[in-house]
Image (cartoon, helix red, strand yellow):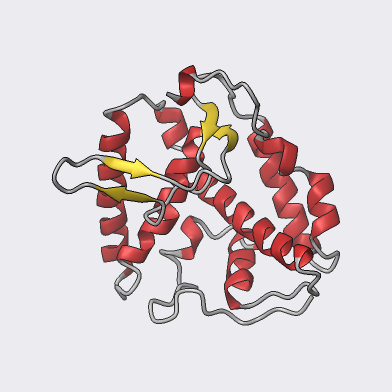
Amino acid sequence: MSKGYTPVHRRYSFFDKYNAEYFDKLIPSSLSLLKEKLVELLNTLEGLDRNRESYGMIHFDYNDGNYSIDFDTGQITVYDFDNSCFGWYMYDLADLWTHGVCWIAAEPDADKRKKFMDDYFKTVLEGYRSETTIDCTMLDKLSLFIKVTLMENIVDAFEVMHNNSEEPECDEELSYLIKCLEDDIPYKGFFHEIYSCEVPFEYEKRNI
């Protein structure tokens, strides 16, 4: 439906919000490495195709908490489209991946976590491909788009603080996400030694 959608009132596009000027305004200057990594990520995204098969209206918050399943029919109903915008379809798949880790987060064995996530994403793609196509070159960029979901999470955290007139502060979860971006740790650190299965987002708070 998205690939054939012609909007009457157009939603914003990804780069309307996610750009270097906005990052510089929103994120404290003390986090200069984070800003640098975010701009590098933007530059990579600028070089990606934005054709009709890869880029269009996306949910932008697609996860296991934003759909329900009728177990009699298998019908999936998606809701909470508040964040919808024009972006890469691969973003929604990466967003689903990052939330899917919750199903196996308590497993201490990284190899078992990886096996589960491979199977999980295989099931996701089977369902996705029953409705539409996605190019293999985009699927190869799963790790890249997981980084983009971290970008969204980080920007959202600073936006909430700004909108609530709060002083910027990095709690454990935000510090963890920033660490993954700054140190180029792939897959949200889920298969890395940084990850703790007991407290997935436990990480030393950083000062701003």
- Residue 109 to residue 7: above or below: below
Residue 141 visible? The answer is: no
- Is residue 194 toward the left or the right of residue 172 in the image? left
Residue 185 image point, x, y percent: 54, 60
Give the answer, above or below, for where 122 lies relative to 182: above
Residue 37 makes an appearance in the image: yes
Q: Is residue 142 left or right of residue 114?
A: right
Position of the C terminus by quadrant: bottom right
Q: How many marks?
A: 0
Taking the view exactly as shown, the residue that stands out farthest to the left is: 72
Q: Position of residue 23 (x, y in %)?
A: 78, 52
User: Foreground: 17 or 119?
Assistant: 17
Q: Nearer the viewer, residue 161 or 25?
A: 161
- Residue at 16%, 40% (x, y): give it: 73
Front position in the image: 77 or 192: 77
**Residue 89, how many percent across, how many down?**
48, 34
Residue appearing at x 64%, y 36% in the figure: 45
Q: Position of residue 39 (x, y in %)?
A: 74, 47
Corner quadrant of residue 100: bottom left
Quadrant of residue 168 within the rendered picture? bottom right
Name which quarter of the figure residue 153 lies in.
Answer: bottom right
- Identify the residue at image location x=66%, y=58%: 156
